[in-house]
Amino acid sequence: MVRSITFTIDSHLANVALVAMSLRSICSLVALSPEELDELEIGVVEALNNVIKHGYDNTPGLPVTTAVTLEDHQVTVQISDRGKRIPAELLDRARTSCLDMDTDDLTKLPEGGMGLRLIISSANSLEYHVDDGINTLILEKIF
Amino acid sequence: MVRSITFTIDSHLANVALVAMSLRSICSLVALSPEELDELEIGVVEALNNVIKHGYDNTPGLPVTTAVTLEDHQVTVQISDRGKRIPAELLDRARTSCLDMDTDDLTKLPEGGMGLRLIISSANSLEYHVDDGINTLILEKIF
Amino acid sequence: MEPSDSDLVETTHHEGVLIVRLLTKRLDASVAPRFKTAVTDHIASGHQYLVLDLTAVDFMDSSALGAVVSCMKAVGSRGSLAISGAHGTVMKLFKLTRLDRVLNLHDTPEGAAQAIKPS
Amino acid sequence: MEPSDSDLVETTHHEGVLIVRLLTKRLDASVAPRFKTAVTDHIASGHQYLVLDLTAVDFMDSSALGAVVSCMKAVGSRGSLAISGAHGTVMKLFKLTRLDRVLNLHDTPEGAAQAIKPS
Ligand SMILES: Nc1ncnc2c1ncn2[C@@H]1O[C@H](COP(=O)(O)OP(=O)(O)O)[C@@H](O)[C@H]1O
Ligand SMILES: Nc1ncnc2c1ncn2[C@@H]1O[C@H](COP(=O)(O)OP(=O)(O)O)[C@@H](O)[C@H]1O
C-alpha cells in the first residue's frame, strides 16, 4: 500500500523540527532501519534549513512543503520552495566531494559548508529541478 | 514560542494514521499529558474519518488538511475540506447528548454514530464553520 | 478468513476457545471492515467462544469499536466473547462509551480463555 | 550566559572542569547560534577546560556541529574540550565527517572531566 502526506511549514527554523519528528514517526510504518532513518532525517533537516537560511534568506512567513510517500521498500521525500535555487555548481561540487574533514590542523576545521554533502549522502538518489520558480529536491531512500 | 505545521493528505482512510502519528510526535514538544494526547488523537482521527467517509463519500484523491499550532499551554487543530458539511442539527445533537451507551440490551448496542460525540469530548472547545465551500473544524486543547 | 487478513489477525486455540490476536498497532476505520469480517467469519463457521486479544493495539477508533460490538452481537447468547490486553486509547474508548461494563475484559488471552471456556 | 539560555544548557563544576550539559533533545539550526554563544561566553570568561555533555541530545544537524567546532577552536591549545554522551544521529554526524578522530569522546561527563582535568 502506498501512503502519502505533505507537511507544510512557514519559513522559520524552529518549524523544521516539526517536519523531522513527523517524518520519523510515520517512517515506523515501513521497514527502514534506525540507521537509515537517522540518515534520512539528517538529509531532510539540512535541506529544509538551507531553504530557510539561503533560499529565503531567513525571511519568515514563506511556505516550505515536504511531501513524503511511503512504499514497502522506498521512502520518497520531495521538498519544494519558491526561494532562490541551490546554485548548480555548488550542488555538483558537493556530489563529487567527500564529507571527511581534514583534521590535521584543528584551527582550519570548517564550521559550515557540510549541509549539501550531508543531503547527498542521506539518500540513494537525489534529483533537483526548478519549474516556474518552484525549486524541488527529491530524495529517495531505498531499503 | 509558537510553532505550526499543516498536514495534507488525500481522502483515503489509510492516510489518516499518518496525520495521527505525526500529531502525536510533535505534541511531545509541549506539556500535554498522555491522557490528553490520547483524547486529542481520537478526536482528530474521528473528524478525518468523517470527512473522508461522509464529507467526500469515500471518493479518493480529494484534499484534507490538518493545521496544528503548538503553544505553551494550548494545541489547536484546524481541519479543512471541500466536501459535504456536517449537518448542523447532527452536530448540535451530539453536543448535548452523552457518550454513554445503553448497555441493558446487548442486541441494541450501537455499532456507529459515536464519532461526533467523541470529537466533541476530545477538546476543550470546538468551532465549525463553512466559508466558500470550505468546511473548517477547529479543536482547541488547553492544558 | 481470507489469506489477505494474515497481516491483521492470527488465530490459535486454547481449551476450546478461539483466540484472535490482532497484529496491527492501529485498529482504525481503514481496517475495521476487514477485522469485522475476519472475526464474524470465524463465528459463522461455528466458533462460539472467542477471545479478541488487543495487546498489540495502541490505537482504536469508533469504527473499530463498532466492529467489536458487531462481534459481540454475532456471538450473542449462544457463546461468549472476551477481550484481553486492552490499554491506552483502546481502554479509554471502552470507558468513554461505558462499554467496559459489558465487555469481558482480561489482562491476558489465556486468562480470558479460562474465564469463558465452555464447560 | 544570558538567563534566556537556561532552557538550553546547565553548567556544573567537576574537579576544575566546567561541565556544560545540553538540556534540549534537538540541537539544530534553530538553537545552534545560542548554544555557541553560551559556550564561547564561558570560554571568554576564563574557563579553559570544558565538557559538552550531549547525553540528552537525540538529534544534531550540521549547524550544531559547526558550533561544536567553534567551541573547540575557542578553547584552542590553551585548554581542553571533551564531549560526553554522544549517541544516535550525533555520533553518526561525528563519524560521517570523521570529526570523531579529533573529538575527545567519553561516555559520561565525569569520565570526560577526569580525562581532561588540569593537573
Ligand atoms: N536552498 C538553497 N538555496 C540557495 N542557496 C543554497 C541553498 N542551499 C545551499 N545553498 C548555497 O550552498 C552553500 C553551501 O550549503 P551547505 O553545504 O548546506 O553549507 P552551509 O549552509 O553551512 O553554508 C550555502 O552557503 C549557500 O550559498
Ligand atoms: N464531515 C462530515 N460531512 C458530512 N456528514 C457528516 C460528517 N461527519 C458526520 N456526518 C454525518 O453525521 C453522522 C454521524 O457521524 P458520527 O457520529 O461520526 O457517526 P458515524 O460516522 O459512525 O455515522 C454521519 O453518519 C453522517 O451522516
Image (cartoon, coloured by chain):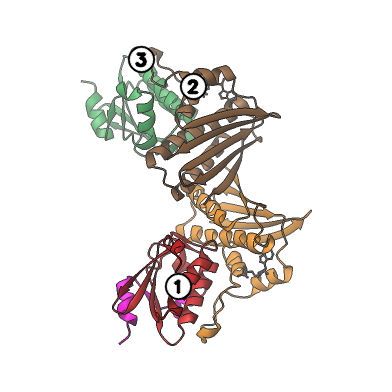
Chain colours: A brown, B orange, C red, D green
Per the model, the C-alpha gap separating discs 1 and 3 is 66 Å
Residue B113 on image: x %, y % = 61, 72
Residue type beneath disc 1: Val
Q: Is mark 3 within 8 Å of ligand 1?
A: no
Q: What span is colored magenta in the figure?
A: C98-119
Image-quadrant location for residue C5: bottom left
Q: Does residue D57 appear in this view?
A: no
Residue A28 versus residue C97: which sits nearer the camera? A28
Which residue is located at x 32 percent, y 20 percent? D48
Residue type at mark 2 is Arg
Task: Give ligand 1's quarter of the image.
Answer: top right
Of the residues shown, which amino acid type is indicated by label 3?
Leu
Tell me the subunit letter for badge 3. Answer: A
Q: Position of residue B72 (x, y in %)?
A: 54, 48
User: How many residues crowd mark 2 within 10 Å: few (<14), some (14–19), many (20+)?
Assistant: some
Cα gap from disc 2 to disc 3, whole angstroms: 25 Å
**How far across and down, in percent of the image, does residue B12 sit?**
60, 56
Q: Secondary structure at mark 2?
A: helix
Q: Is the residue at mark 2 from the same chain as the one at mark 3? A: yes
Task: Tell me the number on the disc at residue C39.
Answer: 1
| Residue labelled with disc 3 | A106
Q: Which residue is mark 2?
A: A95
